[in-house]
Amino acid sequence: MSTTNSETNSADPYFQSLFAERIGGSGYGKGTAIYKFEKIKRAKRKALADFPDRQLIDFGIGENDGVADAKVRERMAVEINQPENRGYADNGIGDFQQAVARFMQRNFNVTLDPAAEINHCIGSKTALSMLPACFINPGDITLMTAPGYPVAGTHTTYYGGTVHKLPLLAENNFLPDLDSITDEIWERVKILVLNYPNSPTGRLCPPEFFEKVVKLAKEKKFIVVQDAAHIMLTFDGRPTSFLETPGAKDVGVEVHSLSKGFDMIGWRLGWVCGNPTLVRAFSDVKDNCDSGQFIAIQKAAVTALDDESIPQRVNAKYRRRLEKLVTMLNECGFDCQMPGGSYFLYTKAPVASADGGSFDSGEAASQYLITQHSMVTVPWDDAGPYIRFSVTYEAADEAAEDALMAESKKRLMSAGLTF
């Protein structure tokens, strides 16, 4: 008996049963759950369609709105034409590693061996995805903060490990409660992932907490991965590296990025630095995953790393924008404080609006702001109902920033939010 076209089209392809369980197994592609960022994208499209004449105010974008500094782009323009830059970079070039060493010494008084204690990565995301491969076996645990950047946790589960989440709560100053971890959990912990300045809370980590982490790592025998992507966007005091902590290099590595602090979003370049054996393990995994970032980009990054004015200028811009945002939101009923770092403002979500709307979660509040007022935020409900504002919106100058704040205030005041 022949099979009709409709029967063939409705049947699963032969490879449906071949998908790995880590991405859903035979059910891959059939789920109905929608990731929150996809929900935001859909709501944005609807807001633009429903209110075509109303400006969409986007506080949800999590990437710099500025382009890389002119000197960096000029260096790149030269380097792309140099024949010696055409080949595979593999585990990086000495010029970049040496520039990183100078940067770490100058900014944090951290001395690193460029050849043994630094390696580049094609963005910090790739480093966070590769590091679990160095340590996680089935049954092992990675400690992750919630909310937090999930990539290291995702790859932990890929290798058969488990993620143990540590909520970031206001009563703990948005630091993970390491004392809450049981001995049973500690016995299986391989990695603790930290991220300060924290995304999305914007909080900093005090030196005494890093000291506690180092002591615990030696006692409980785990390694520390500190994601420092926002480190140059520190507003309360000077930027602080985990590797400044006595003994930190014995227990972990720090992951850096040129995206946030240097306006090099899309250039895909960062580095892993710290304990030489851990860096070597990362390098071995990396050597089997990629062939290195384009050498011209690494050389352009040397220009960025050696120019202190670039991160200072980026820092000043986002500090200014955050100060304006905090003032405006407080005038609209929010209870906000200036974050210690990052370009994010993490604040409790409203619970109701004047038109009768009620919100039982950050996601519900965020969807209301998008659909009814064309204002994009990102919800976080991992540790209570919060929403995140980002000051990476596009604005040509301070006058444009002020105009956007004024329009945002007008819309929020009209919403009559309660908290």
Image (cartoon, rainbow, N blue to C red):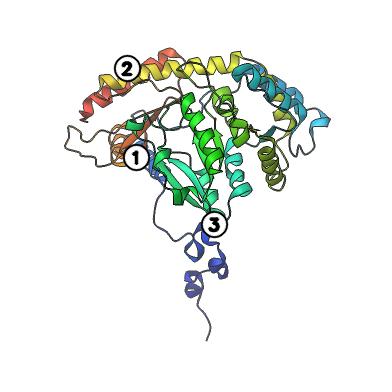
Q: Residues within 10 Å of mark 2 (few under 14, many from 20)?
A: some
* Residue at mark 3 to residue at mark 1: CA–CA distance: 25 Å
Left or right, 117 with respect to 60, comes to right
- Kindly identify which numbered label has been placed on residue 383: 1
Q: Which residue does the numbered mark 3 point to in the structure image?
A: 160
| Rendered residue at 22%/30% (across/down) | 417
Crowd class of label 1 (few under 14; some 14 to 19; many from 20; radius 10 Å)? some
- Answer above or below: position of 89 versus 164: above
Q: Nearer the observer, disc 2 or disc 1?
A: 1
* Closer to the camera in the image, 36 or 271: 271
Q: Residue at x 75, y 28 (%)?
A: 80
Where is mark 2, residue-wise? 327
Where's residue 235, x and y in %? Answer: 46, 18
In the rendered image, residue 382, in percent from the top left (x then y), is placed at: 36, 42
- Image quarter (top left, top right, bottom left or bottom right) of the C terminus: top left
Identify the amino acid type marked 2.
Answer: Thr
